[in-house]
Image: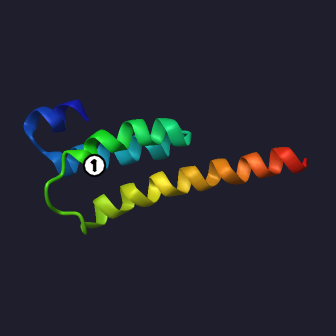
Amino acid sequence: MAHAGESGALSWKLRAATDLVRLRQAPPGAARAILQPVLAAFTEGFTTRDYLAALELIDATAQRQSTDRTVHRSG
């Protein structure tokens, strides 16, 4: 991520951040903390596959946390 950022390769940085979140199975707060700064740097390309995948990943981790809380409360 750092190398991509230093090179100005924002799309590569986003892809690396997305992969990092997936590999770590990051909780929602961590996923947001990793992805949000990269997403905020975009000024165009909001419909690219990588950008949309990052948004979906943030949503999926939030939904997973909601499901986990529900299971723990009922279990």
Q: Nearer the viewer, residue 40 or 50?
A: 40
In the picture of the structure, the residue carrying the numbered disc 1 is: 39
Give the left or right position of residue 4, taking residue 68 as reference. Answer: left
Residue at left offset 25%, top offset 69%: 47
Q: Crowding at label 1, few (<14), some or many (≥20) Cα neighbours within 10 Å?
A: many
Residue at left offset 73%, top offset 48%: 68
Q: Nearer the viewer, residue 52 or 74?
A: 74
| Colour logic | rainbow
x and y, in percent, of residue 75 in the image: 90, 47
x and y, in percent, of residue 26 in the image: 52, 39
x and y, in percent, of residue 16 in the image: 31, 43
Residue at left offset 36%, top offset 43%: 35
Quadrant of the image occupied by residue 50: bottom left
Amino acid of disc 1: Leu
Q: Quadrant of the N terminus?
A: top left
| Furthest-right residue in this view | 75
**SS state under label 1:** helix
Residue at left offset 17%, top offset 32%: 3
Give the left or right position of residue 40, taking residue 32 as reference. Answer: left
Q: How many marks?
A: 1
x and y, in percent, of residue 37 in the image: 29, 39
